């Protein structure tokens, strides 16, 4: 039987999310309804535009409709010198399936894989389950969670098949800058290594200057690049379960399509139509404008909280995405037991957070860290932080250290 490690963050969400009164663990921008989506589209013709009610519910376009793939290709091509051809996109059930398919296709036993860390556990646990050797490439908290390219060079082995990055990064909200991406591509090209970039939080760059916006990994003129993304995070539509694999390499797309036949056949035609609608202009721009404004507004609240409790909280202010990685310490500067903290907080106040040590650090790294999702509805974040304040006053100093 295949052995795969337990998926700690998804298990935590499964266990605690339904009972959360103030969910500050959510990683999607505040979700929207189909009516909200129509309002953002500046049209009122809901049935004609968003869903074709007369369409027979056959399997439909196997790889995704031409219209949807064109919209995704355009999204992946922003700031790219050469646009991504539409046929270089495969539609999947969320980014989770996109990652799984691309990793299952491109990584085999005896391969070596280098993975950005900390990150979404799927990105290293799936290659590990396929028999690959894994090297974690640690981003440096004391250097704003940057990655060191010299270290990457030292991690390369003769059998290195893939470098996996997550940009923007979950859980830290850090961004890999253009020159870092260029460095990764240069090193990968020299050794013929595939670069797999989970870009599910693109393009939610709420605290990055316009001239510093990093392009997709597909924009560096290197064929062996894969980008995965979805409608869940920056586009507020996790419920339609729609994601994608995009690559500059026709061989990689064909290999993924071949594996995909065993698991997907086609994605729901209803989901395909809704995503096509959401990703067209002006809807997509209005949606992103809404979410970037929400991220900035809520981040101010979180920033104020971290300043107010500066004796207890340490962080690198996030620049993009929907999550912040905050370390909680006691009056002596010792990191708290993050699991105990999250359990006690939720039991006493209904505020849900995610313990970083359990869900991003295999119980070894990131002591005292919690992940906070702050791109919820403003009132949810405000109420959750108020409850957290009450907890800080009444309960916090009773908590155990790690
Ligand atoms: C980095 C990352 N990749 C992929 C996913 C999966 O998202 P979805 O399948 O909803 O697109 C998540 C969800 O939290 C994530 O954080």
Image (cartoon, rainbow, N blue to C red):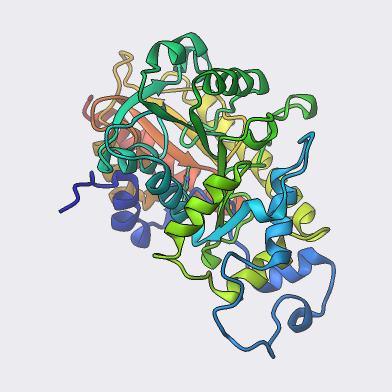
Left or right for 8, reference 247: left
Residue 132 in picture, x, y percent from top left: 29, 34
Q: Quadrant of the C terminus?
A: top left
Q: In screen coordinates, is 397 left or right of 115?
A: left
62 versus 309 height, above or below? below
**Residue farthest toward the front in the current orientation of the protein:** 251
Residue 396: x and y in percent read 32, 32
User: Going 67% across and 87% down the picture, which residue do you hit?
Assistant: 55
Residue 144 percent location from the top left of the image? 53, 18
Residue pictured at 67% horizontal, 55% vertical: 87
Quadrant of residue 249 within the rendered picture? top right
Q: Residue at x 24, y 47 (%)?
A: 6
Looking at the rendered image, the quarter that the N terminus falls into is bottom left
Most distant residue in the left direction: 1
Q: Quadrant of residue 322?
A: top right
Q: Which residue occupies 67% across, 72% down?
A: 273
Residue in the foreground of this view, choosing between 168 and 217: 217
Above or below: residue 35 compared with residue 151 = below
Q: Quadrant of residue 341?
A: top left
Please tell me which residue lies in front, 399 or 243: 243
- List x then y, in percent, for residue 253: 55, 50
Residue 61 placement, left or right of 306 = right
Is 121 rendered above or below residue 177? Answer: below
Q: Is residue 129 visible?
A: yes
Vertical position of residue 355 compared to residue 382: above or below: above
Tell me if I can see residue 231 in this picture. Answer: no
The mark tally for this picture is 0
């Amino acid at each position: 039987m295949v052995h795969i490690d337990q998926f700690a963050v998804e298990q935590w969400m499964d266990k605690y999310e339904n009972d959360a009164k103030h969910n500050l663990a959510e990683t999607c921008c505040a979700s929207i309804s189909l009516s909200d989506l129509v309002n953002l589209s500046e049209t009122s013709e809901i049935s004609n535009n968003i869903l074709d009610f007369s369409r027979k519910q056959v399997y439909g376009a196997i790889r995704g409709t031409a219209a949807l793939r064109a919209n995704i290709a355009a999204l992946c091509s922003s700031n790219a010198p050469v646009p991504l051809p539409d046929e270089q996109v495969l539609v999947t059930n969320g980014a989770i399936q996109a990652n799984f398919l691309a990793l299952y296709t491109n990584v085999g036993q005896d391969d070596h894989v280098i993975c950005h860390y900390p990150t979404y556990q799927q990105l290293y646990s799936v290659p590990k389950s396929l028999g690959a050797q894994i090297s974690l490439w640690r981003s440096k908290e004391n250097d704003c969670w940057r990655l060191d390219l010299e270290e990457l060079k030292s991690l390369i082995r003769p059998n290195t098949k893939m470098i996996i990055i997550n940009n923007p990064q979950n859980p830290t909200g850090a961004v890999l800058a253009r020159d870092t991406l260029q460095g990764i591509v240069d090193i990968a090209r020299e050794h013929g290594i595939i670069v797999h970039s989970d870009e599910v939080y693109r393009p939610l760059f709420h605290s990055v200057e316009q001239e510093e916006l990093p392009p997709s990994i597909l924009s560096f003129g290197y064929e062996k690049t894969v980008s995965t993304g979805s409608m869940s995070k920056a586009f507020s539509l996790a419920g339609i379960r729609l994601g994608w694999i995009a690559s500059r390499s026709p061989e990689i797309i064909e290999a993924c399509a071949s594996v995909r036949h065993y698991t997907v056949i086609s994605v729901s035609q209803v989901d395909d139509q809704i995503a096509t609608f959401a990703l067209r202009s002006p809807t997509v721009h209005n949606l992103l404008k809404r979410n970037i404004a929400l991220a900035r507004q809520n981040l101010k609240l979180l920033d104020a909280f971290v300043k107010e409790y500066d004796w207890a909280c340490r962080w690198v202010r996030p620049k993009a995405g929907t999550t912040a990685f905050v370390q909680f310490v006691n009056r002596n500067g010792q990191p708290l037991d993050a699991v105990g903290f999250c359990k006690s907080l939720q039991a006493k106040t209904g505020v849900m957070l995610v313990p970083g040590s359990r869900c991003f650090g295999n119980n070894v790294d990131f002591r005292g860290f919690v992940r906070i999702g702050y791109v919820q509805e403003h009132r949810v974040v405000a109420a959750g932080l108020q409850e957290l304040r009450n907890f800080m006053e009444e309960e916090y100093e009773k908590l155990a250290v790690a």
